[in-house]
Amino acid sequence: MSHENRTALVTGANRGIGLAISKALAVDHGMKVLAAVRNATVVAETASAIGNRAEGVIMDLADPLRVERDVRDLDKRIGPIDVLVNNAGVLFSGAGTQVPVEDVQESLGVNALAPFALIRALAPECNREDGDGS
């Protein structure tokens, strides 16, 4: 099934599952893929690995307020995003008392707050003032 007029935003698109999903959406389904990565040095390489229906975008998911701004900017520049793949995640290791607070903050930002911010930015109908989401 072709979805040539649809656009997908895939976070963590530069490797593993995110890269595989991005390729499938672009190649198998004909979607335009916005491949969101954190590191500016891999953005072009990531888009190239996915194919000609991909555009690399830099997103720092550790900052949920910036995520919402980035989505608004993408919407203005590219148009609506039809599909969201919240794939990015970070892990930290070590004994709880030895893990730096900054690592915990980053993990919460990328793993919990960023997906929420992305959903919120892409599904404004869920943000009705009455709060019931319907």
Image (cartoon, helix red, strand yellow):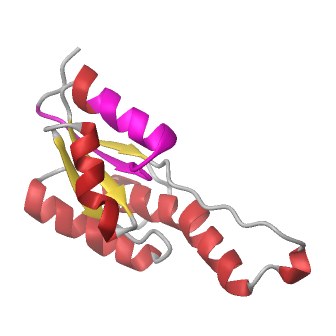
Q: Which sits in the foreground, 81 or 48?
A: 48
| Quadrant of the rendering where the N terminus is positioned | top left
Residue 83, position as x, y percentages in the image: 32, 41
**61 left or right, relative to 1:** right
**Location of residue 88 with respect to 97 vertically, above or below:** above
Residue at image coords 45%, 74%: 64
Residue 17, position as x, y percentages in the image: 50, 38
Residue at image coords 41%, 78%: 65
**41 left or right, relative to 129:** left
Image mark count: 0
Residue 120, position as x, y percentages in the image: 41, 60
**79 left or right, relative to 36:** left
**47 left or right, relative to 67:** left
Q: Which sits in the foreground, 108 or 134?
A: 108
For the view shown, which residue lies furthest in the bottom direction? 101
Q: Is residue 71 visible?
A: yes
Residue at image coords 50%, 74%: 62
Q: Is residue 131 visible?
A: no
The span picked out in magenta is 5-25
Residue 7, position as x, y percentages in the image: 21, 41
**Location of residue 93 with respect to 13 vertically, above or below:** below
Residue at image coords 18%, 69%: 73
Please tell me whether residue 110 belongs to the stretch shown in magenta. Answer: no
